[in-house]
Amino acid sequence: MTATLRLTEELISRPSVTPRDEGCLDLLATRLERLGFACERLDRGPDPQRVSNLWAFFKGFPALAPVSSEKSASDSIASGAAPKTLVFAGHTDVVPTGPLDQWRSPPFTPTHRDGKLFGRGASDMKTSIAAFVVAVEEFLATTPKPALSIALLLTSDEEGPATDGTVVVCETLKKRGVALDYCIVGEPTSVERTGDMIKNGRRGTLSGKLTVKGVQGHIAYPHLARNPIHLMAPALAELVATPWDAGNAYFPATTWQVSNVHGGTGASNVIPGTVVVDFNFRFCTESTPESLQQRLQAVLDRHGLDYDLQWTLGGLPFLTTPGALVNAVRGAIRAETGLETVLSTTGGTSDGRFIAKICPEVIELGPPNATIHKIDEHVTVADIEPLKNIYRGVLERLSR
């Protein structure tokens, strides 16, 4: 059993259903402190929903200013300037298990079958966290004084509301004036094999709750009522057919989707007085929250609706164009697997949206994601060591 597999199993065995950490961060901090990392807990929130956060940094950190692109990291250290900083980011919390009787083996008992490791969090994302730590251990064993600052940012609040986790740590670092240069988020991004796809950006998410007002009445006397569902329908059809933008070289076009429609009293003979529509934009860098809000409200106004509208911005899009980090990741993947990785911005949101506000280069890289959040979540054992080796390869490339 490799060190990475052993640590992955230790993490899976802890039932850290969000926002609980169940001692995962203590376990990791103990290993990191042995390497010379300074570990700081930035926990937040009241019990029993208290969120566990760990900020761990290797000596020489924090970097207060980015290194000039004209100098190498080693030159910068020799001249007394701060080295570049690579952060590994991830979450120890997992989603609930679902019905236990549908799992072939207990979700928090690491179990091997057919070359796969089963357990909640196996793919999302305890394997990545174990690979982070072991990659750093191996790297520092051969490079005890790297020309690179190394840090880890770990939370137990990614699968939940994400209000007391990574966002809090990033706000704290920003207030301290800490400069970050590169970040790898360990989200499961691969499709068939570890390294075949990475995320170099994510779309933004903007949700809305629309309440269209009518007049309640008896269904047999429609002339005495105003049915808000009927009033809303033409506007809804126009919104569904609206092209919000065409996307760009890195992002697909912005999409708009209705997630819920609530109307009626439950009686079949009553015209409702209101209808509530929940919807969401997944938007690219070609649109802004303000432009989407204005265009949607213009449609509602054009149809003469009486409405209330509440907006929730879940996160802005971020994009890392090919540069030092992407090139290092591509090179490490190629050297380990022979694959030419695909850059992608598809999928949902991640904590990368918070980190991108204080770090110019953020990518996501992890194992295949086919079973995340599912019953019998698993990772192929043969994907684990290559992931650790890729992370170590990135460290080696960025420290040259």
Image (cartoon, grey):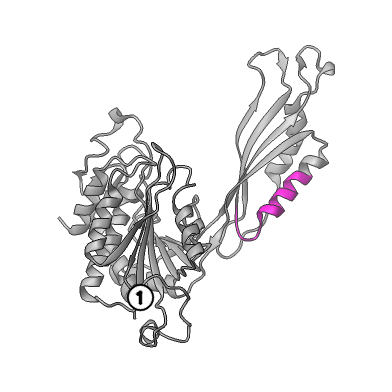
The mark tally for this picture is 1
Q: At 82% across and 42% down in the image, what residue appears? A: 302
Q: Is residue 296 magenta?
A: yes
Instruction: Specify the quadrant of the image occupied by residue 199.
Output: bottom left
Q: Nearer the viewer, residue 8 or 382?
A: 8
251 relative position to 121: left or right:
right
Residue 253 location, x and y as percent? Answer: 61, 55
Residue 217 location, x and y as percent? Answer: 77, 15
Residue 383 visible here? no
387 relative position to 207: left or right:
left
Read off the magenta span. 283-298
Q: Secondary structure at mark 1?
A: loop
Q: At 76% across and 19% down in the image, what residue appears? A: 216
Type of the residue with mark 1 = Leu
Residue situated furthest left in the rendering: 1
Residue 227 visible here? yes
Residue on which the image places disc 1: 148
Residue 52 location, x and y as percent? Answer: 37, 48
112 relative position to 360: left or right:
left
Quadrant of image for the C terminus = bottom left
Q: At 48% across and 54% down in the image, what residue appears? A: 167
Instruction: Specify the quadrant of the image occupied by residue 330.
Output: bottom left
Q: Is residue 268 magenta?
A: no
